[in-house]
């Protein structure tokens, strides 16, 4: 899922680590698209890949690091 940087509301500066899978690290951000709030997780095999994605989401990098696994999209309820 390609996103516009104007849609990003918050970028988590910490790398998400899976408790179930050995080599699964993710960069996470919250996006407002069309009035819906989405939590996107970009998973990688290494923590350095996830840190590169965090740098991209924060606007510090120009190139998009391709995720190693399928991107996870969660629709947030926001208390409703």
Image (cartoon, rainbow, N blue to C red):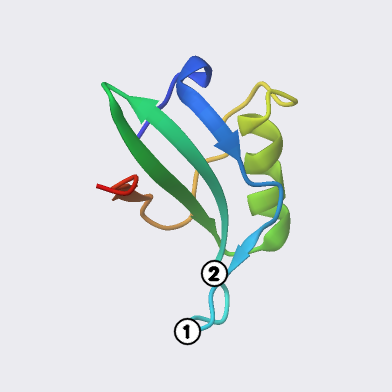
Residue 15 quadrant: bottom right
Marker disc for residue 68: none
**Placement of 73 over or under 11, stated as above or below:** below
Residue 61 drawn at (x, y percent): 71, 26
Q: Residue at x 48, y 55 (%)?
A: 68
Question: Depth check: 33 or 43 in front?
Answer: 33
Judged from the image, the secondary structure of the residue bearing numbered disc 1 is loop
Please name the residue that numbered disc 2 is placed on. 24
Question: Around disc 2, counting alpha carbons within 10 Å, would you say few (fewer than 14), some (14 to 19), or many (20 or more)?
Answer: some
Residue 44 drawn at (x, y percent): 55, 58
Question: Around disc 1, counting alpha carbons within 10 Å, would you say few (fewer than 14), some (14 to 19), or many (20 or more)?
Answer: few
Q: Residue at x 71, y 36 (%)?
A: 55
Residue 70 quadrant: bottom left
Question: What quarter of the picture does the N terminus occupy?
Answer: top left
Marker disc for residue 20: 1
- Point out the frontmost of discs 1 and 2: 1
Judged from the image, the secondary structure of the residue bearing numbered disc 2 is loop
**Placement of 37 over or under 18, stated as above or below:** above
**Placement of 54 over or under 24, stated as above or below:** above
As measured in the structure, the alpha-carbon distance from the residue carrying label 1 to the one carrying label 2 is 9 Å
**Placement of 13 over or under 31, stated as above or below:** below
Count of residue discs: 2
Residue 33 drawn at (x, y percent): 32, 25
Q: Residue at x 54, y 69 (%)?
A: 24
Q: Tell whether label 2 touches label 1 (CB within 8 Å).
A: yes
Residue 4 drawn at (x, y percent): 45, 19
Question: Depth check: 26 or 63 in front?
Answer: 26
Question: Depth check: 19 or 22 in front?
Answer: 19
Residue 65 quadrant: top right
In the orientation shown, which residue stands out farthest toward the top? Answer: 6
């Amino acid at each position: 899922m390609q996103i516009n940087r104007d849609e990003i509301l918050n970028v988590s500066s910490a790398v998400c680590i899976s408790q179930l899978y050995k080599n699964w690290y993710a960069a996470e951000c919250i996006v407002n698209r069309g009035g819906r709030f989405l939590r996107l997780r970009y998973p990688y095999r290494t923590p350095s890949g996830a840190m590169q994605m965090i740098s991209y989401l924060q606007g510090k990098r120009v190139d998009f690091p391709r995720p190693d696994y399928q991107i996870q999209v969660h629709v947030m309820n926001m208390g409703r």
